[in-house]
Image (spheres, rainbow, N blue to C red):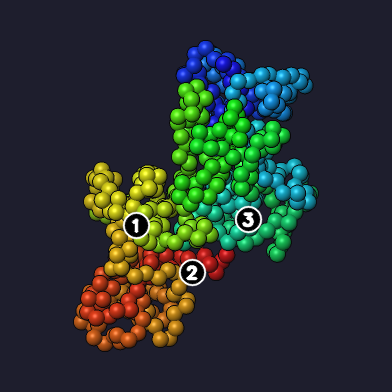
Amino acid sequence: MKYIIVGAVAGGASTAARLRRLDEHAEIVVFEKGEYMSYANCGLPYYIGDVIKERNKLFVQTASAFNLRFNIDVRIRTEVISIDPVKKTISAKNLQTGLLYEESYDKLVLSPGAEPIRPPLPGITLPGIFTLRNVTDTDYIKAYVDQRKTGHAVIVGAGFIGLEMAENLHALGMHVTIIEMGPQILAPLDFTMAALVQNHIRGKGVDLKLNSTVSGFEKDEARLKVLLKDDQPISADVVILSIGVRPDTKLAVTAGLQLGTAKGILVNEFLQTSNPDIYAVGDAIEFTNPITGISMNTYLAGPANKQGRICANNIALGNNFKYGGAINTAIVKVFDMTVGATGISSKHLTAAKIGHMVSTTHSGSHAGYYPDSKQMSIQITFAPDSGRLYGSQVAGFEGSDKRLDILASIVKAAGTIYDLAEFEHAYAPPYSSAKDPVNIAGFVAENILQKRLRVVYWNDVAKLTGEDLLIDVRSPEEYASGSIPNAVNIPVDELRKTMTTLPKNKNIYIFCQVGLRGYLAQRILVQNGYENVRNVSGGYALWNVCNKESQLA
């Protein structure tokens, strides 16, 4: 059997290696139009920022080492330019010599990845304007910024790579401006969680411009001028475009393969395209989301590697291995913070017309009496009937990655909020609390689902009228240091003595700093005949950050 694989980074390299482990005698040829194969794409910003000191650390495998270990013919700097599905051949071009030739195949795997979006803006090809997608891009950017470490870097786009580049260029000593066309950073997140991270970014001295559109670029003597649609131009020494990516489907289109509604190569559960002898993996494909049932892309290395293994199994052993889809679990370091998401956010569930509930909790990263515990925020979305966990977002510091992985495993397994409440974790004071933040998220969601806790969200507070009663149940000292406008202060420990003065015919809204005291206050009132009592989800801490960020957006 002869297998051809187009693309030699995450999905392609994984497929090739697995195929060899399954079939020692097959002929395997891998084509890669770039200069490098199997490199650590996700590590590129950290090499630019000098966190990763040695360039060679970026390479998982070289073409020669891959050939030696796996007996696989890897042809770098060779582009596959067309596919003939009838003849079962590909046409390739050696980009160094210009030689054109054909190769036949029994099975073909497409792993062409995605390509960065470069909108046709005036001046976008000027020197000093870069996208970051591969090692060659990285080399150009690093050489350029190493000569301008005290300059001004403008990042266009506040996605995962944009924020990683912002942090790393800031660490080199550059002044950084982030320009984002949308109302928040990190589109997979809901605004409440994005606001926490935005506040942290601003605290680092980074200029964050939201709802801001770049209209073009101009040369400004030795510098660049970034033109904005509704604001003054910004002078810059380097511009990084992180606007997004799209599936590279050029080969698939010319081969007559079916694309999906998300404009990726459509594959079935066995990772087969519309042609049974052609499979596809990685950033270029689309598949059915296991939660929403909607066709989607994912641009993540983890799913690509897993797809490569499954794809190879199906090619070598028959179509017996199903790909269950990805839930887009992703994480990013943003200066000192860690933020990540898994599953489906509230705004995307709303767009998909899927009914759901939301809970936001704040907990310590480990036992409060052990030094250096830091606040961690967890927001979950779940079904209003079964409590099935649809998604989660985590923003915090140490241990945030561990909690996100726990939540992702439960989302992937179609688990429920009750699984969160009962999750058994390893506990010692330096690592967690007896009730882990994941447990707390489950407890609160269970209370909401069973109607023991009724919540409103930070943006509902502005809709309250003079007929509503807003109560801050924190201490007088906390109240004096800042509170939601028009709130009255009744500390939770004094509530039983003073509640007879509260009207039972009004809507009462309660909040504390992060939620616990507010919940206790609500339980006191509800069990004493107050029926219309609701808590502000996430407490004053979340309201304060979201309110500030909504005004800055």
Query: Marks 3 and 2: in contact by CB < 8 Å?
Result: no
| Image-based side of 216 in relation to 31, left or right | right
Seen from the viewer's position, the closer of residues 14 and 205 is 14
Seen from the viewer's position, the closer of residues 204 and 42 is 42
| Image-based side of 231 in relation to 529, left or right | right
For disc 1, the marked residue is 386
For disc 3, the marked residue is 179
For disc 2, the marked residue is 547
Observer able to see residue 504: yes
Q: Quadrant of residue 127?
A: top right
Seen from the viewer's position, the closer of residues 527 and 235 is 527
Residue at disc 2, secondary structure: helix
Residue at 54% across / 31% down in the picture? 11
- Image quadrant holding the N terminus, namely top right
Q: Is residue 377 above or below residue 107?
A: below
Q: Which amino acid does label 2 sit on?
A: Asn
| Image-based side of 468 in relation to 285, left or right | left
Residue at 34% across / 57% down in the picture? 386
Distance between the alpha carbons at the discs numbered 2 and 1: 32 Å
Q: Earlier in the sequence, mark 2 or mark 1?
A: 1
Seen from the viewer's position, the closer of residues 164 and 263 is 263
Q: In which quarter of the image is residue 54?
A: top right
Q: What residue type is labelled 1?
A: Ser
Q: What residue type is labelled 3?
A: Ile
Q: How crowded is mark 3: few (under 14 residues within 10 Å), some or many (20 or more)?
A: many
